[in-house]
Image (cartoon, helix red, strand yellow):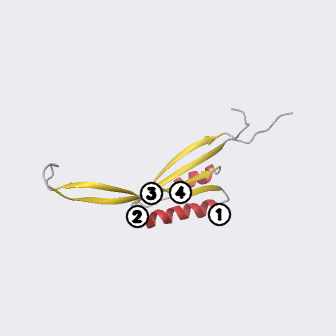
Amino acid sequence: MVTQFPAMTFVTSLTLESGDRAALDDIVGEIRDTVRRKGAELKGPHSDSPKQHFVSQYKQLDGEGDTYDAWSYTVYRRRVEIRGADDLARDIMTWDFPNSVHVTADIERVQHVGSPA
């Protein structure tokens, strides 16, 4: 008797970052709705705490001497995982994302418990 194990599953983790919270939430919502409509498994979105960044502004181009008040900006981050649906994840990565939203993908192959190595 031959035991048949399910194929390995690929998990695509998407990290989306932006200083424009509304644009970020719109894109994450589109991803969520698309994945659900296609019947794939989605984990998230998970929100990280916003990160505040400060940039020194010098009054002279050489970067020495007096400074203006630091310029500050906030970066928002959302994370989602798409399990299985490799073609769908690949399709989402070809979307034309707004310039204000930075997207990175990490793909991991997950072996099911009890399946051969």
Q: Are marks 4 and 1 in contact (CB under 8 Å)?
A: no
Residue 75 found in image quarter: bottom left
Q: Earlier in the sequence, mark 1 or mark 3?
A: 1
Residue type highlighted by circle 2: Asp
Q: Which mark is residue 37?
A: 1
Q: Residue at x 40, y 64 (%)?
A: 20
- Identify the element where label 1 is drawn: helix
**Label 4, label 1: how far apart the Cα atoms are:** 19 Å
Considering depth in this image, is 50 or 8 the residue closer to the camera? Answer: 50
Q: Earlier in the sequence, mark 4 or mark 2?
A: 2
- Identify the element where label 4 is drawn: strand
Q: Earlier in the sequence, mark 1 or mark 2?
A: 2
Considering depth in this image, is 56 or 35 the residue closer to the camera? Answer: 56
- Count of numbered circles on the image: 4
**Label 2, label 3: how far apart the Cα atoms are:** 14 Å
Q: Look at discs 4 and 2 and give the one toward the viewer.
A: 4
- Identify the element where label 2 is drawn: loop
The residue labelled by disc 2 is: 20
Q: Look at discs 1 and 3 and give the one toward the viewer.
A: 3
Q: Look at discs 1 and 2 and give the one toward the viewer.
A: 2
Whole-percent x and y of residue 62? 15, 48
Whole-percent x and y of residue 73? 33, 60
**Label 4, label 2: how far apart the Cα atoms are:** 17 Å
Residue type highlighted by circle 4: His
Rendered-image quadrant of the C terminus: top right
The residue labelled by disc 3 is: 49
Residue type highlighted by circle 3: Ser
- Identify the element where label 3 is drawn: loop
The residue labelled by disc 4 is: 46
Residue 39 found in image quarter: bottom right
Q: Residue at x 53, y 57 (%)?
A: 46
